[in-house]
Amino acid sequence: MDSFAQERDGELWLYGLHIAEYAYGTWTNHQPRRLRKLLLRRVEINKILDRVRDPGLTLVPLSMYFENGWAKVELGIARGRRSYDKRQALAERDANREIAREMGRHLKGMPRRDG
């Protein structure tokens, strides 16, 4: 998911959350990636904002489900990766991709590529 929640005018809003359009909808269908206001009590908003005020923390949706026509979103507080973590994750992903590529070649009986 590329979505996150952020405070705006004392309210919490979801940015970038994709909810697919209703297949049998008409011209009254919604936009899939519009801003979405989170309906929370003031006490809940204040509690969340107190936790998120620390630098480097962000509010992200963990899961979403529908109940009685409402989209329910479970939120979590996450800390972004540091630059050295990003480099390590990219190197690990590239290595895993290369391993999978070589395994596919081996299973197909193709010669090994060196270099």
Image (spheres, rainbow, N blue to C red):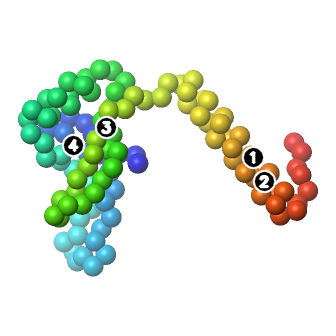
Query: Please, which residue is most extreme toward the top here?
Result: 54
Position of residue 10 in the picture relative to residue 64 (left or right): left
Q: Can residue 33 be seen here?
A: no
Q: Earlier in the sequence, mark 4 or mark 3?
A: 4
Q: In x, y percent, where is residue 111? A: 91, 56
Q: Earlier in the sequence, mark 1 or mark 3?
A: 3
According to the picture, the residue beneath numbered tag 2 turns out to be 103
Q: Earlier in the sequence, mark 2 or mark 3?
A: 3
Where on the picture, by quarter, is residue 11?
top left
Q: In x, y percent, where is residue 71? A: 22, 57
Tell me if label 2 and label 3 are in contact, CB under 8 Å. Answer: no
According to the picture, the residue beneath numbered tag 4 turns out to be 13
Closest to the camera, between mark 1 and mark 4, is 1
According to the picture, the residue beneath numbered tag 3 turns out to be 76
Q: Earlier in the sequence, mark 1 or mark 4?
A: 4
Crowd tier of the residue under label 2, counting other residues whose Cα lies within 10 Å: few below 14, some 14–19, many 20 or above: few
Mark 3 residue element:
strand
Q: Earlier in the sequence, mark 2 or mark 4?
A: 4
Residue shown at 77%/58% (left/top)?
104
